């Protein structure tokens, strides 16, 4: 059964091929909208399909519903197969090249009879594009340049890499004369798990000074554009940064605009228009009399629209505007609410520090409870623990607990492997003897959907499992998680009351925002854990909190906000 990502890929391909074919733009937009909507759907489209409710999916009308139906029934789509015969699918790879749209792609393909990326690159370098109608040496050079920059650029940048770089840049900008404020914008400020580029906003009375400093930063490969209020650069490693500079009195509108998301902004502009106001990055302009309202802060922007301020993590047009109107925005969880960290590793398996060192570092960061979840026996590469070794670890924990006193409570836990056959790594009576059990997948992630889903459900149904760690096993960037039927997994968790983890490490952020939000809807307790293997890892907690905020989670939804007593009571109720 195709999942949402595969369905979305099919519709994106249809849109790309149709554009090259020269189809009407409104048609192709409808396919893109459907693809977008599928990617942002909290549940699998196949669930809607089984209920006969495909039309409930935003952006899915009759024609698209029929196509989804065919894809889910047969795994193929006759319409797309025909399209692929008319337009070679390889051409789609040309579309991201700056300076080469669908029209030019079609022209090059038809006149030179080439269809692959490599052939295009060779033709451009050999000077074969300049003589085509409507082109010239300049546009040919732009295409060569575009191909080069594309091959340098990694697709999307993990938030964990982008965020520290942005903070360092912001610190630099704040040193420039005339600068009053500097903030992240775009997906960076909304804390998406990956970002396409870094957007940074600066409030300054002297924009030119900031722009000049920006385009002269070290390690710049090239300046993509330089203007009075907006410039962008590309660093040698392919990372792109867009800088927006505005006078302090309009910083609010500028920040709202540049934070996005685009979809959220569109909704705000609609609301403004209903009040005869046109909202831009500079101001609200009254369309009747031309007068302007300037907003120095975001609060003023939202207030002008009759809304409370909306936290950036919610600005995805996923119901936040309706919630704001009704004064029902969630009271989002914050870093300071977290008092427990229920997955971390020590030198007993693959961690870098001793349990005592980790406990002290965690206490220093405000933790009242931690759980050592050293790996289980079958995960040999990580020094997984035998049951014999666990006895020694238990004794060691009793010893360090005395040294630590009541500064922090240390739980003896395990990150028990959910094995390829769906069984757990230790017998039940042993699991029952631990303070807490977290079960995770690390191996055979590529099993077919039914099988890998069943493995996780088995673990959820085991009465001795308390938390499912990093449920899909994805790694950012580069490794897709297991093809889980998340709806089935979450339904099982809702039945048994097992907690689902948001792993805070920026390479994981697993559950993701959408799945975590669905988990909340189903009343499933959520854990946010660092999975720390070192001191630095303990500081990754804010990424997990950000993902939780993107999932609309409040402190009450997250077990790590509980007092030690409440946490122990919960574990006791679970049979411990
Ligand atoms: P990214 O970089 O792909 O992770 O995503 P964003 O959300 O950072 O988007 P980006 O970098 O293309 O643009 C930054 C912000 O600029 C975006 O969040 C909202 C605003 N923006 C960009 N394009 C448009 C547009 O066409 N309309 C409106 N209203 N806003 C836009
Ligand atoms: Ca961006
Ligand atoms: Zn793990």
Image (cartoon, rainbow, N blue to C red):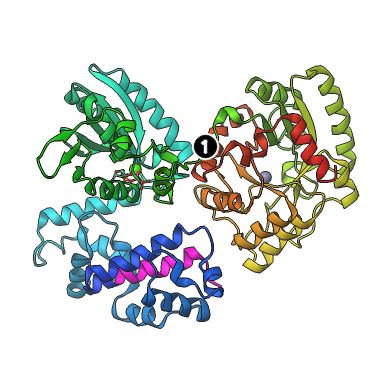
Q: In which quarter of the image is residue 27?
A: bottom left
Badge 1 marks a residue whose secondary structure is loop
Residue marked by disc 1: 332
Tell me if 352 is positioned left or right of 176 in this view: right
How many marks do you count on the picture? 1
Q: Which of 310 and 208 is in front in this view?
A: 310
- Residue 76 x/y as whole percent: 46, 79
Q: Nearer the viewer, residue 573 or 78?
A: 573
Mark 1 crowdedness (10 Å alpha carbons): few <14, some 14-19, many ≥20: many
Q: Residue at x 39, y 60 (%)?
A: 36
* Magenta stretch encompasses residue 226: no
Q: Residue at x 28, y 72 (%)?
A: 18
> Is 38 drawn above or below residue 344 in the view shown?
below
Q: In which quarter of the image is ligand 2?
A: top left
> Is 440 drawn above or below residue 7 in the view shown?
above
- Residue 574 x/y as whole percent: 81, 46
- Residue 494 x/y as whole percent: 69, 55
Q: Residue at x 25, y 38 (%)?
A: 232
* Magenta stretch encompasses residue 11: yes
* Span highlighted in magenta in the image: 1-17
């Amino acid at each position: 059964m195709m999942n949402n990502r595969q369905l979305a890929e099919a519709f994106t391909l249809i849109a790309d091929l149709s554009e090259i074919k020269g189809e009407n733009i409104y048609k192709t937009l409808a396919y893109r909208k459907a693809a977008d909507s599928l990617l942002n759907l909290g549940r699998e489209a196949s669930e809607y399909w089984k209920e006969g409710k495909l039309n409930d999916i935003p952006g899915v009308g009759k024609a698209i519903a029929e196509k989804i139906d065919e894809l889910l029934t047969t795994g193929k789509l006759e319409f797309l197969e025909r399209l692929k015969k008319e337009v070679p699918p390889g051409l789609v790879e040309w579309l991201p090249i700056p300076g080469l749209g669908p029209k030019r792609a079609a022209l090059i393909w038809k006149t030179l009879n080439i269809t692959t990326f490599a052939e295009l690159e060779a033709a451009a370098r050999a000077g074969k594009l300049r003589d085509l109608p409507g082109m010239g040496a300049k546009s040919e050079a732009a295409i060569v340049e575009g191909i080069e920059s594309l091959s340098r650029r990694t697709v999307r940048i993990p938030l964990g890499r982008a965020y520290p770089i942005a903070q360092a840049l912001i610190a630099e900008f704040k040193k420039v004369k005339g600068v009053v404020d500097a903030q992240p914008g775009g997906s960076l400020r909304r804390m998406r798990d990956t970002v396409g580029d870094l957007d940074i906003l600066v409030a300054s009375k002297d924009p030119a000074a900031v722009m000049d400093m920006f385009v002269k930063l070290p390690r710049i490969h090239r300046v993509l554009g330089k203007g009075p209020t907006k410039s962008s650069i590309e660093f040698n490693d392919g990372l792109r940064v867009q800088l927006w500079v505005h006078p302090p009195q309009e910083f609010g509108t500028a920040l709202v605009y540049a934070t996005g998301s685009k979809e959220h902004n569109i909704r705000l502009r609609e609301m403004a228009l209903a009040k005869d106001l046109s909202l831009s990055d500079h101001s609200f302009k009254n369309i009747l009399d031309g007068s302007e309202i300037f907003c120095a802060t975001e609060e003023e922007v939202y207030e002008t629209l009759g809304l409370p301020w909306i936290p950036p993590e919610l600005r995805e047009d996923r119901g936040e505007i309706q919630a704001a109107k009704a004064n029902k925005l969630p009271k989002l969880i914050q870093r300071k609410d977290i008092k427990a960290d229920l997955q971390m590793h020590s030198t007993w398996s693959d961690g870098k520090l001793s349990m005592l060192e980790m406990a002290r570092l965690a206490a220093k960061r405000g933790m009242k409870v931690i759980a050592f979840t050293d790996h289980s026996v079958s995960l040999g590469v990580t020094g997984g623990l035998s049951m014999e070794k666990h006895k020694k670890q238990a004794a060691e924990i009793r010893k360090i607990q005395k040294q630590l006193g009541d500064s922090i409570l240390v739980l003896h836990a395990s990150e028990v492997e959910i094995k390829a056959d769906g069984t757990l790594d230790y017998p039940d009576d042993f699991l029952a003897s631990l303070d807490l059990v977290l079960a995770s997948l690390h191996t055979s992630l590529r099993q077919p959907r039914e099988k890998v889903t069943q493995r996780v459900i088995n673990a959820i149904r085991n009465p001795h499992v308390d938390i499912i760690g990093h449920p899909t096993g994805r790694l950012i960037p580069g490794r897709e998680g297991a093809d889980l039927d998340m709806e089935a997994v979450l339904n099982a968790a809702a039945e048994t009351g097992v907690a689902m983890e948001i792993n805070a490490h920026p390479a994981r952020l697993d559950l993701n925002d959408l799945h975590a939000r669905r988990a909340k809807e189903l009343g499933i307790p959520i854990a946010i854990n660092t999975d720390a293997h070192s001191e630095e890892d303990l500081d990754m907690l804010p990424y997990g909190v950000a993902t939780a905020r993107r999932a609309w989670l409040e402190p009450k939804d997250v077990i790590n906000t509980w007092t030690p007593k409440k946490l122990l009571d919960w574990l006791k109720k679970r049979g411990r």
